Image (cartoon, coloured by chain):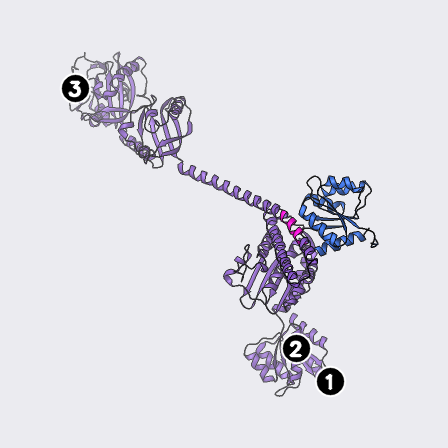
Amino acid sequence: MLAVAALKRLLPGVHYEDAPRTVGGSQDDQWRDAHGRPGTLRRRTDCVTPLASGFDSILNAIAEAVLVTDRHGTIVLVNRQTERLLGYAASHLVGQSVEMLVPELARERHADYHREYLKAPRLRPMGEGAQLHVRCEDGSEIPVDIGLSPVTISGEAYVVSTIHDVTARVQAEERRFRAIFQQKHQLAGIVELDGTLSDVNDCALDYSGLQRPDVIGQPFDKTGWWNHDPELQKRLRDAIRAAKKGATVAFDATHPKADGGLGLVDFSIRPVMDESGDVSFLVPESQDITDRRVAEDAKDALQRAVELAETATKTKSRFLAAASHDLRQPLQSLGLYLSVLDRQLDSDAHLEITAKMRRSLDVMGELLAALLDVSRFDSGSVVPKVSDFPLQDVFERIYADNVQQAEAKGLVLHVDATELRVTSDPALLERIIENFVVNAIAYTKTGSITIACDVNGGDARIVVADTGIGIANDQLDSIFEEYYQLDNSTRNRQQGLGLGLSIVRQIARLLEHAVGVESTPGVGSRFSVDVPLAERDTAIEADEQVSARDASYSPVVVLLVDDDPAVLDSTGLLLDSEGCTVHTATCGSDGLDKLAAGLRPDVLITDFRLPDFDGLELIRRARRTAGSELPAIVITGDTSNSAADLGKSDQLHLLHKPVCVDDLLALVRRAREA
Amino acid sequence: MSGSADAEITIAALDNDLAVLDSLQMLLTLNGYSVRTYSSARSFLDDVHRCTPHCLILEPNLEDSDGAAVARQLTESYLFIPIVALTAYPDSARTRELADIGVHTMLAKPVTSEVLLSQIASALLSQ
């Protein structure tokens, strides 16, 4: 802001015109120019000041609206920007009371503020905190920032005001405010310090189906969001009181919903402070949490249901166990009574009846045992006792317990002996394997059942394979379910309860052993369980497995050439039994044909004497096709030195007939390692 | 035990279940034993000095006591009677307790009459 006096200091030597003027209603205001000559303000439409044209130009060049008032509030000076801003010609402003520019609502207080200002005038913005407005010629009101500065001229007090149009800023702020205020998810409003609602967003109105005119200006606690619950209204009033003192208060509340229900919300009310730290208004907000509450309630209900189900299962299991134990008593007495009766009967007919009774009793006993099993595992009362032990022990027990049943059906029960040791609960593991075996026997009509094991990673995979009726693919999962039986749709109790595999599954889960099944209907099934190998043997087993794998999965490929079929046969068989894959040829060209067809043997074994060309020639030609590194063994009956010499020079091994089997095998193995 | 034809071998059976006691009595009597049945530990222990059996068939889970207590009472009275435990509660703590003290055999109901008779015979022979 510039004071005229300050301007005058800046422009020394500028001449001022001194045309006397009258200012409406008051005495002429005098000021002195740089030389002390008096001058007066001139009221002219085309020149806003009687100063020299330089000063005029500067004043009118100032980008802000400038307005000077005297101590009575009469406008004594305006610049061009003021005219532009307010839409008044200077002639309609100068000499008028500044109150004409003050919006009606503010007029009352303005007079007071003016008086206050004059008591202690200083450079400062006008009206701190609140938004000021000026009234324009057309009656509209523009938001402005006004700066005030006092000046004394000829002993008279004046106030120089600059008026800055902040419409753009206010509009931008309003847009931002509206954007936040009007968002869709949160109910929001503005509550004045007297507790009345002065603004509210559409979200709040829509939520409760209220109309804006009905709520604006009303005490907030009496509005439609609150008046359904007097307790809540009181709580709100307390909250408003606390918020006016600077606190933020939050609590769960209910608001009526537009559709007639009651919505649950997370309500909060907080104060907004002005620059001096005083609360200027309050902002109430509500967030609908009905859905969240529904979800939480559902989660709680689900949790309770799960706990209930778990308790029910445990209770059921305990009850089952208790009932089962009680069942043991009558089963015992019935059995003994039957034995006594048997002893007292003579007639075959009668004895037949008691025999049938005995069978029924036995079935009952089995059912009881199975039920007890299931309940025991269900109730979690089985604790495995884990140790290291040799699998062979388990296999032998199972064999002993089941071989008779197998043979009674004409089946062969076979165990592949093993030296593997595993880490598990021997009794529980035995149950799994025995169950597989019992099932295999039950579901195999002819053929065999084999118990074997192999190393699979760090586990021993125990496999019970049968040549039974097999299981269809779509039933493979179901067979582990309780009471599921293949082929027993009439639920013939003589075939057991069908609980065996479900118990297997429970034991397997308890021991953390993987159980698997493969099957081909009409051909047979393989049930397997993976058991961790006992640690100190793992390394050894791995080595053994590697060499075993070498032998079984990438056998030595031998091309054996001899025109004597008996030799071909016997040598071939020998090599085959050692795990080699043997290809034979009865003459050299046959052998070469095989190589030409793509055979790449690890070693070529040939007789020296062949019908078409000798063994050495064959080796030479073979090496042209299959690589010069192809290991070769020549078997010769020729003990002469020439043959021996040949052996050394042609990079091949020579064996004399009759061939020592060990030598041959050693050479073959060495050929593979090469 | 030489088991002469004149000497009567007495088997005592202690169990809460009356049908079990009755069927045991019938079976054992049929097999030539003299049988005394008791449905409470109290009644057995009151009688045992007067009529000491050669073998006891005992259910360790009794209403008024448990098998271990009965067994201890017997040894404290210097009555070394072989016990064939026959229990409807093979997993119970009381059964385990009795097993820890030591019995001739631990059987779980239901057992066949053959098994029971052979175990009794073996218990009698162990004397």
- Which three-letter amino acid code belongs to the residue tagged 1? Thr
Q: Which chain is blue?
A: B
Depth order, front residue of A603/A262: A262
Secondary structure mostly seen in magenta is helix
Q: Is residue A381 left or right of residue B65?
A: left
Q: Is residue B57 magenta?
A: no
Is residue A536 shown to the viewer in this render? no
Write down the region rendered in magenta: A326-335
Q: State the quadrant of the C terminus of chain A.
A: bottom right
Q: Residues within 10 Å of mark 1 (few under 14, many from 20)?
A: few
Question: Residue A326: image x %, image y %?
Answer: 63, 47
SS category of the residue bearing label 1: loop
Tell if the residue under mark 1 belongs to the same chain as the one under mark 3. Answer: yes
**Most extreme residue toward the front, as rendered?**
A347
Residue at the disc numbered 2: A573
| Nearest to N terminus: mark 1 or mark 3 | 3
Residue at the disc numbered 1: A639
Residue at the disc numbered 3: A43
